[in-house]
Image (tube, grey):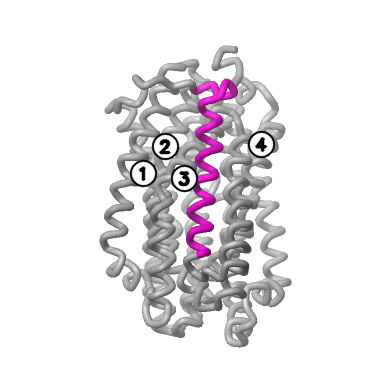
Amino acid sequence: MALQNRSASLGTEPISNLLVKQSVPASIGILVMSLNILVDTIFVGNWIGSIAIAAINVVLPVSFFIAALGMAIGIGGSSIISRALGANNKEKALKTFGNQITLTLLITILMTVVGLYFVNDLIPAFGGKGDIFEPAKIYYKIVLYGVPILALSMMGNNVLRAEGKPKIAMIAMIIPSVGNLFLDYILIYVFDMGMAGAAWASTASYVLSFLFIFWFFLSDRSELRISFSHFGLNMAILKEMTALGFVTLARQAVVSVTYLLMNNILFSLGGEASVTMYGIIGRMLMFALFPVLGVTQGFLPIAGYNYGAYKFPRVRESINKAIKYAGLLALVIFALIMIFPEAIVSVFTTDAVILKETPWAMRWVFAAIPIIAIQLIGSAYFQAIGKATPALLLTLTRQGFFFIPLILILPNFFGELGVWISFPIADVLSTIVTGFFLNREIKKTLIT
């Protein structure tokens, strides 16, 4: 069957149906991945100790940043693929996919080597001080071995969505999550391997995801059947792909810088306990927002395909409905966090100090979550249609332009409270800015 015929549903089916078809699998995949991180943290906190939560929180920025290289290449290239499918340009889609694989391997292997070489400098810089250093070092070195495989998996997952295969992408996210939890139990609880067990469980789970995605693209079920000629780097495609992917990479770079600052600021204000609090709250942010992030992921190929096909009324409809659905889901999340923070924290640890201090901080962090859909969908829209500069600026608005300055300033006046209130203030300010530019872009370009 021709490539365009197999992906044409993105331009013909009702937007509501497409959002459900694209978002539900994405949400389930993100849920399982987030649940994996959440349960992994629970296992580590209960079977190793609360200091282990802080250790993993220190390592995450480094491994996430390198893995984000794969995600950035995946999202940047997938934007090109979605629009190429909409414009019926099969060769460009295939060439883009081949270039994604080559670029991911080259960059992530290099970054892994550099990350391992500077291990003793990076861990303290990201807040791995005092009792946190040794367990963080054990976890970091092992996890980093599997990061190139994780990067390839993240890249391939986004290509699956661009190809119109959200269910396959969901399975690719579920496999490593389930595998990691099973391996956690075996290596940490049964074999008592401690931090090394947690790290090897994560690394092995990356391999499982990669093997599944690799099998799919080699099978007849994939439309993107590339040949060796497609692996050769094409400068025009690389330029467009890196410009769009830089949006995701810059966002993750800012996240890594945020972790660095937060871990160091909180360590100076409250020691290991405050870093552990942030570890728990950070996991809840990843977990609780899964349906909102799922809608955002589902929205990307729909907007990209229809924009490439010049079906602007469908693009407008996809924006409006994505914001509506994501906003309603965010409101539900807000209510649950506000009502049950104590019960949530008690799942992670029995440490009395953590149980007492974390719930009030969590309420502040989630205070403005109901409006976050506008910011997420708005910045995602510019990325979906290939406008890299506004996508980059809007993506960096929340954490780069607002949150980082706030956490550098407010703790000087309000202590640890200043750190937590920075979250809702940044959410409100970034939503206002994104809403303004999104509305202006709709009126300017999405004309019938």
Which mark is on residue 246? 1
Q: Which stretch did the figure color magenta?
A: 197-224
Residue drawn at point x = 50 percent, y = 33 percent: 214
Distance Cα–Cα, label 4 vs label 1: 26 Å
Residue drawn at point x = 49 percent, y = 16 percent: 88
Which mark is on residue 180? none
Precedes in sequence: disc 1 or disc 2: 2
Q: Mark 3 points at which residue?
A: 437
Contact, mark 1 vs mark 2 (Cβ under 8 Å): yes
Q: Mark 2 points at which residue?
A: 76
Distance Cα–Cα, label 4 vs label 2: 20 Å
Precedes in sequence: disc 4 or disc 1: 4
Which secondary structure lies at badge 2? helix
Distance Cα–Cα, label 4 vs label 3: 23 Å
Residue 97 belongs to magenta span: no
- Kind of residue indicated by mark 4: Leu
Contact, mark 4 vs mark 2 (Cβ under 8 Å): no
Contact, mark 4 vs mark 1 (Cβ under 8 Å): no
Within-10-Å neighbours for mark 1: few <14, some 14–19, many 20+: many
Within-10-Å neighbours for mark 4: few <14, some 14–19, many 20+: many
| Depth order, front residue of 355/215 | 215
- Please tell me whether residue 75 is drawn above or below residue 41 in the rendered image: above
- Kind of residue indicated by mark 2: Gly
- Kind of residue indicated by mark 3: Phe
Tag in front: 4 or 2: 2
